[in-house]
Image (tube, rainbow, N blue to C red):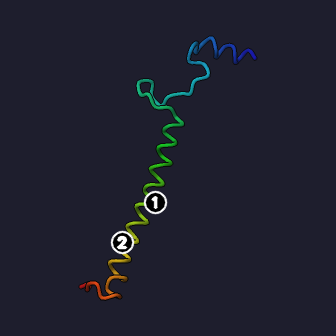
Amino acid sequence: MGEAKRRKSTLGEDYGKEARILPWLPITKSQSEQFVAITTKGAWIGIGLMVTTWFTVRFVGPAFGWWEVY
């Protein structure tokens, strides 16, 4: 229990608050982790859309006679 009291006296009002990435940047570590998770999911969605578009342009369109691939 002495360690917790020492930390509380050292941190003062910041005790119990989530740590920031940088002292001058108002973004917490959990917010940065959430940002990474969202952007990673978005990147995978973009990759999937790109592959679907490529497949459609390369195979589906010519198969139905919509256009010709040279």
Q: Amino acid at mark 2?
A: Thr
Foreground of the two, 1 or 56: 56
Q: Is residue 21 above or below residue 45?
A: above
14 w.r.t. 57: above or below = above
Q: Residues within 10 Å of mark 1 (few under 14, many from 20)?
A: few
In the displayed structure, does residue 21 sit left or right of residue 11? left
Residue at screen point 32% across, 77% down: 57
Instruction: Give residue 7's position: percent from left, percent from top.
Output: 64, 17
Task: Give above or below for 29 relative to 56.
Answer: above
Instruction: Choose top left, top right, bottom left or bottom right for residue 49.
Output: bottom left
Task: Classify the position of the C terminus by image quarter.
Answer: bottom left
| Quarter holding residue 54 | bottom left
| Residue 15: percent from left, percent from top | 60, 18
Residue 50 placement (x, y as % from top left): 37, 67
Among all residues in the image, which is located at the extreme right? Answer: 1
Residue identified by numbered label 1: 44
Secondary structure under the numbered disc 1 in the rendered image: helix
Q: Please, what is the three-letter code of the amino acid marked with disc 1?
A: Trp
Depth check, mark 2 against mark 1: the one in front is: 2
Judged left or right of residue 13, residue 21 is left
Q: Residue at x 47, y 43 (%)?
A: 35
Tell me the CA gap for discs 2 and 1.
14 Å
- What SS does tag 2 mark? helix
Residue found 52% across the figure and 42% down from its top:
33
Identity of the residue drawn at 69% across and 18% down: 4
Name the disc covering residue 53, or none: 2
Quick one: label 2 or label 1, which is nearer the N terminus? 1
What is the x, y in percent for residue 61?
A: 33, 82
On the image, which quarter does residue 26 sit in? Answer: top left
